[in-house]
Amino acid sequence: MSGKVIVFFILAVLLIIFTVQNELLINIRFFKWEMTDVPLVMVLIAGLIFGFLLALMTQLPRIMHLKRQLKDVINELENDNVVADKDDDITAEGIKMGSDYKGGFFNE
């Protein structure tokens, strides 16, 4: 198993232990809504999930923009390699030399 899976399982077990040990019931009021006898752990978990989703939603446009930029750069590099392959000379050893190659280090 990978390290991420092991860490996930350890955190899940710790969350279950935390949930079982903390059975404190609270009352929640939000504007006109009122909920009574809600486990504190469920409120904390809901807050964590809401915070994660909120952070994801704020970063999603940036992630999509970066993926689009990466795709454009990859396409540009692939197109440049096709043009560069036509200009390069291949010697008998199979080594590609640029079009500006003049015969060696000591030859000028």
Image (spheres, rainbow, N blue to C red):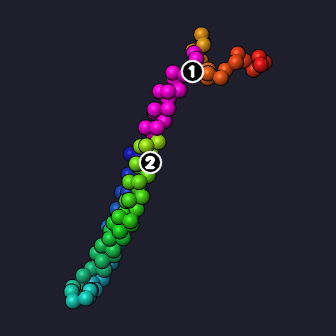
In the displayed structure, would residue 47 be above or below residue 65? below
Instruction: Tell me the SS state at disc 2.
Output: helix
Q: Decide if residue 50 is in sight here.
A: yes
Relative placement, left or right, of 45 versus 102 is left
Q: Which amino acid does the dot numbered 2 rest on?
A: Gln
Residue type beneath disc 1: Asp
Which is nearer the N-term, disc 2 or disc 1? 2
- Which of 13 and 33 lies nearest the eye of the viewer? 33
Identify the residue at image location x=41%, y=49%. 67
- Rendering quarter of residue 38: bottom left
Q: Picture coordinates of residue 49 (x, y %)? A: 32, 68
Element type where label 1 sits in the image: loop
- Residue 82, given in percent of the width and then of the height, sits at 47, 27
Q: Where is residue 1 in the image (x, y as percent from the top left)?
A: 38, 45
> Do we see residue 52 in this rendering?
no
| Point 70% across, 18% down: residue | 102
What is the CA distance from the residue labelled 2 to the residue labelled 1? 28 Å
Location of mark 2 (residue)? 69
Q: Which residue, given by chain and number where applicable, does mark 1 sit on? A: 88
Side of 36 relative to 45 (left or right):
left
Q: What's the magenta region?
A: 74-90
Residue at the (57%, 21%) spot, across then down: 88
The percent coordinates of residue 57 (x first, y second) are 35, 64
User: Most prominent secondary structure in the magenta stretch?
Assistant: helix
